[in-house]
Structures are given as C-alpha cells and as structure tokens.
Image (tube, rainbow, N blue to C red):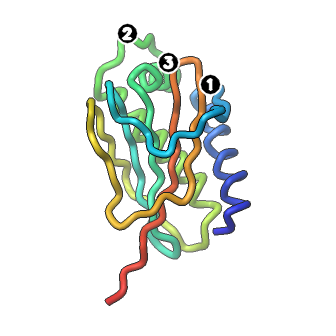
Amino acid sequence: MDTEVASSKFDEVSEGIWSSMVNIPVVLAETQEKNPSHVGETITSSVQIVGSWQGAVCLDMGANLARHATASLVGAEPAELSHDDIRDAAGELANMTAGGIKELLPNPCQISLPTVVMGTDFDFSVPQGMVVYRSVFATEAGNLVVTLIRGEETRN
C-alpha cells in the first residue's frame, strides 16, 4: 500500500464514517500520540485483515466518546446504554472502518469479526504487528485514535 495514498485515504475513511454514520464530527488533532493511552475507562476495538495484505485496524476511545457514539448510532440517550450496547457499537465502528480501509488494499482481502476490549489500565497489541499509520482525531466527547497495523511476514 502506497504510504501517500494511505495517509490521505486512511483519514478520509475514518472522517467519513464518523461524520455520516455516527454524526460526530472528527478533526485531526494537533498533537498525534505515538501510543494511545489505555488509562481510565477505555474501549479498544480491532478487526483483523487477512489475504493479500495482513494486519489489523484498531480504534481506541475513552468511555465518554464511546457512549456518545453509541447513543448516536442506536438513537438512544447516553445514560440508557448498557456495556453490551457500547461494546457492540465499538465493534461495528471498527468493522466499518476496516471495511473502508480494506478497499484501499490489494485484493483479495477479508476482514474478521471485531474484537472489543473495555476496561482501565490495560495493554492491547497485535502479535507480530507493526504500526504503519496512526491518526488521532479530536471530538467534543474526547479523542479517537485509529491505527493501521501491518502483520510482519513470517518465514518458515
């Protein structure tokens, strides 16, 4: 995947999903984090990409942003939402983002079901993966970190 194409198109996919599907405007943050912080109540959702390109798309967001995004997606008040609602929405957001990113990758590629981790003070990693692109988006409800991780090729 061409890095110049990746950077502009990668951000367009994320911005498009959040503005059209979630109705929460996101803008690139002035400060780009090297590693997202998983301190405080955090939701990380990830979808694996397999095929001609191997890797994953990960979304990291605080509980406040996750709750507001879920409320917008399901048409409910933030206070009415359960952990399951938020977990399902975070997984769906990762799924939509990975689906958009998949279109930028060489064919054939498939995406997995999402994995979602909710909690405080945890580490999340993709084994044998290398971050190839990361964007931090600012919203009124908190930051969203979207990361593209490429799986390292293993040799037998």
Q: Is residue 41 visible?
A: yes
Mark 1: amino acid: Asn
Indicate the secondary structure of the residue bearing disc 3: loop
- Per the model, the C-alpha gap separating discs 1 and 3 is 11 Å
Mark 2: amino acid: Ala
Q: Is residue 103 above or below residue 28?
A: below
Q: Residue furthest bottom?
A: 156
Residue 75 position in % (x across, y down): 50, 18
Side (left or right) of 23 relative to 47:
right
Side (left or right) of 148 relative to 118:
right
Residue 135 position in % (x across, y down): 58, 43
Front residue (pair 144, 109): 144
- Residue beneath disc 3: 75
Indicate the secondary structure of the residue bearing disc 2: helix
Q: Residues within 10 Å of mark 3 (few under 14, many from 20)?
A: few
Give the mark nearest the N terminus, 1 or 3.
1
Residue at 63 percent of width and 32 percent of height: 29
Side (left or right) of 144 relative to 39:
right
Front residue (pair 1, 106): 1
Side (left or right) of 127 relative to 75:
left
Q: Is residue 78 above or below residue 50?
A: above
- Residue beneath disc 1: 23
Mark 3: amino acid: Gly
